[in-house]
Structure formats: structure tokens, C-alpha cells
Image (tube, rainbow, N blue to C red):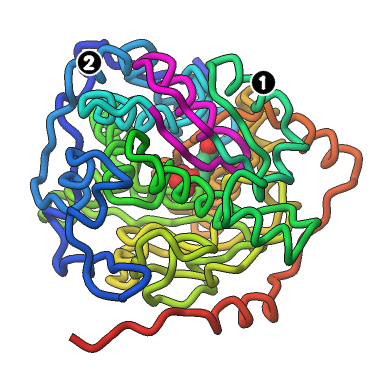
Amino acid sequence: MSQIKFVLGEDRLPAAWYNVQADLPKPLSPPRHPATGRPLTPDDLAPLFPMALIMQEVSQEREIEIPEEVREIYRQWRPTPLFRARRLEAALDTPARIYYKYEGVSPTGSHKPNTAVAQAYYNRQEGITRLTTETGAGQWGSSLAMAGAMFGVDVKVFMVSVSYGLKPYRRAMMESFGASVFPSPSTETEAGRAILAEHPDSTGSLGIAISEAVEVAAKDPEARYSLGSVLNHVLMHQSVIGLEAIEQMEMADAWPDVIVGATGGGSNFAGIAFPFVGKKLRGEGEVRLVACEPAACPSLTKGTYAYDYGDTAHLAPLVEMHTLGSTFVPPAIHAGGLRYHGMAPLVSHLKELDLLEARSFDQMKTFSAGIQFAKAEGIIPAPEANHAVAGAIEEALQAKETGEERTILFNLCGHGYFDMQSYIDYNAGKLHAYEYPESEISMALAGLPTIPAE
Ligand SMILES: *Cc1c(COP(=O)(O)O)cnc(C)c1O
């Protein structure tokens, strides 16, 4: 058999999410108020999030039960399959064993529904009927739109304007689920109007779209805001990926030497890696983690570790993270989901604790890796997922050089069937490698906030 698929029965769906905060050798720094720089209280966050999610954000409990209503929806596509990529191994002629967890089997084609469904559920539980959010490439917006439709919550999406033009099918998907979609910057908000006044041709950024969504939620007492990555509770919801993978690797009689993931805000990478890193922190196994990001938006490899604003208009909380500066607008690479200026505080914290390595890849390298993977395995990855593929191939080729029997596990976080324009451009030789935009990043970093002394 050239391909082996490890499938858990639906009764093996995890009963609880895993919270890495319980096992950290050093706790996270607290989120701070964007205006005063003082640590936030749960009440400060109440206009933006339901209390259940605020409590999950700061929880130190190792396990948090997954509500049955959420598990019922997860069951439609979870547990997701884990594959051994034997044909890719053969193509690379490597002694390494390569496994991948495939999140592209979800209804919207990525890992994003794992948290979208949970967030819509908790908001509905607390009587919220309107959610606002941002989306880059559209994977998050379509996932929250789907979850909103399932729980009877209206969803308003601010979509980074460059993607709004380039990804009409994602927009159609959101609208089919009943969501309303605005190109960001928009004229709907003060934040959007201020940016348009200064830069009428702005192609937008996730930082700007977040400002718009936060502003609308903060002004409407009936509405809350929902974020698709970065925050602790989002990363925790994604832990179902790694919890399932631990069991599936056991079925394969294997343990990963290295786990590889693509990092935009950090949620799919944390989802597959944190349950394994928890075992490492509790002395139950060794594992190396490799986070793969775009060279054009290199928050982990080139960013500064500091408190920074989560959005361009400085309405969202300050968090300590690796950042390129909140006003940084990255080049228009095709991996739209990886164009955020910061990195999840938990992923950043693990990097500071030397628990993970970060690498960056330009888009020529990631698309060539994606095509090599597609030819061997038959799945065309999302442009974001190509970063994980490139990282896994690099690990496999290193193992070939040293003759090592390395076991590699990576997260194939989504399929690329809504992103075929990027493959059309790549195949036509129209893509190029963007340089790391150093001068713009220095400018954006000059705007880091000052934190008051305690
Ligand atoms: C959103 C998205 C990402 C980036 O977000 P993370 O929080 O870093 O996971 C990566 N891949 C896919 C397929 C996405 O939809």
C-alpha cells in the first residue's frame, strides 16, 4: 500500500480542549488596555467578547470541556484523517517518515471552523445575535459565517480589500451563509474612513480590518467581536487537531521528532503542536517544533518581541508578541491568511522560551513545495499551507543528508481549491519572491506603545 490513512472513530472525538497555559514554565504577560497601557480586567473585555471566552482566555486549567452542541457539529468532519505521505517520501528519496494531518476536510476547507463553531456557540449562549469580524483571504470569514448560520447569529465581515477583489468565491460563500461582507478599509467605520482619507487607494490589511470590526462591535451593545487567530482561547479550540494526532500517531506506532506548521496568527500551528509540547513540558516525550512563515511578513523570524497593538487604529488590546508594527502593510503575497503584523502571544512566548524554531520562506519556494506535494499526494494545498509543506520537505531533505530516520508531522491546514488563481499565476511564471520590506517595518516599529511602570 502506498498510502496509509489513520482514521479515528467518531467516538474518539476529544471531550476537552487542551490549554497549554497549565503547563508553561513561565506565565504569559497580561493583555493591556490600548489607551492606558494598564493590565486589562475581564470587564474591559466584556463589550467585545462573551464572558465564557474571556474566562477561557485567562484560564490556567489544563482541560476545558467541549460543549456537546459543539462536539455534535465537529462530528460532521472530525476526527480529521492523518496520512503517511509515502509517495512524497519516495519522490524526495528520504529515509524520513512524513505524516500529515488534513484539516481541509472541514466544510469550509480549513482548520478555522474548529474555533468558529465554538465562538458562535458561546456568543449565542449569552444571548448575542450579532458578530463582527475581519478576514484576510476569506477562510476565517467563511468559517464564522457558516457557524453563525448554524447558531442563528448574524455575521458582518470586513474583508481586506485586496482579497475582496481577488477572491470572489470566498465572498460568495460568506454571502451564501447569510453574512454581509465589506471591503476594508470601508466607509462603514471611523477607522476605515480615516485610512481612506489618508490613503484612498489602500489595499487594506488585517490590522485595519480588525479595527473596523472591533469598532462596530464596541459601539453596538447587542454585538460582539470574533477573532480567528492569535488569542489564547482560539489557539485552545484548535487543540483538537493535536489531541487527535497524538492518538493517530499511536495507531501508526510512531512519535514525531519534529512538528511543522504554517504560522499567520499562530492558531493552526498551536493546534497541532501544543498538545505534543504539553507532553514535553510534563516530561512525557521529546519533540522539536518548527514554525514556517512568509519572508514577506516575518513576524517570528524578524519581528521585535514587545507589547504592541493588535490592530491599526489601536482599539484592540495590547499584547506581548513578536510584531512587525501595527501599521505595517505586508506585500500582497497570495498567502493572504499569513499577512498579520503580529504573532499569537502563546506562540511568541514559546519562541522566547526556546521551545520552537521559526523559519521563513518566499512564495516561489512555497508554491514549488505545494506543487511537489500535490503531484505526490493529489491534494492541492492552500497557499498558506504550502509554508508547512516547504518546512516539512526541508526537514526531510536534511534527514536524507544525514541519513537519519526522522519522523516528521505537519499540519495541512487547508486545501487550495478556492485559491486556484494563485496557482494560475504561479504556473504562468507571474509570481516573484518579495524582499523583506525592512524600511517599512522599521517605520511601523517606531510606533510601538510605551508601557507604564508598575
Ligand atoms: C487562516 C489560515 C492560516 C493562518 O492562520 P493561523 O492562525 O496561523 O493558523 C493558515 N492556513 C490556513 C489554511 C488558514 O485558513
Q: Provide residue 435's location: percent of width, then percent of height.
A: 74, 69
Q: Viewer-proximal residue, 189 or 224? A: 189
Q: Viewer-proximal residue, 393 or 77? A: 77
Name the quadrant containing residue 70: top left
**Secondary element at image label 1:** helix
Left or right of residue 74, residue 20 in this image: left
Left or right of residue 168, residue 351 in this image: left
Q: Which label was assigned to residue 159?
A: none
Q: Provide residue 183's location: percent of width, then percent of height.
A: 68, 40
Amino acid type shown at disc 1: Ala
Q: Earlier in the sequence, mark 1 or mark 2?
A: 2
Name the quadrant containing residue 246: top left
Q: Which residues are magenta?
A: 130-156
Query: Pointers 1 and 2 in contact (CB under 8 A)?
Result: no
Q: Quadrant of the C terminus?
A: bottom left
**Residue 138 is inside the magenta segment:** yes
**Which residue is painted at 16% across and 69% down in the image?**
26
Q: Residues within 10 Å of mark 2 (few under 14, many from 20)?
A: few
The answer to whether one can see residue 345 in this image is: yes
**Secondary element at image label 2:** helix
The residue wearing badge 1 is 172
Left or right of residue 38, residue 362 in this image: right
**Residue 4 is inside the magenta segment:** no
Q: Which label was assigned to residue 69?
A: 2
**Which residue is painted at 53% across and 16% down in the image?**
177
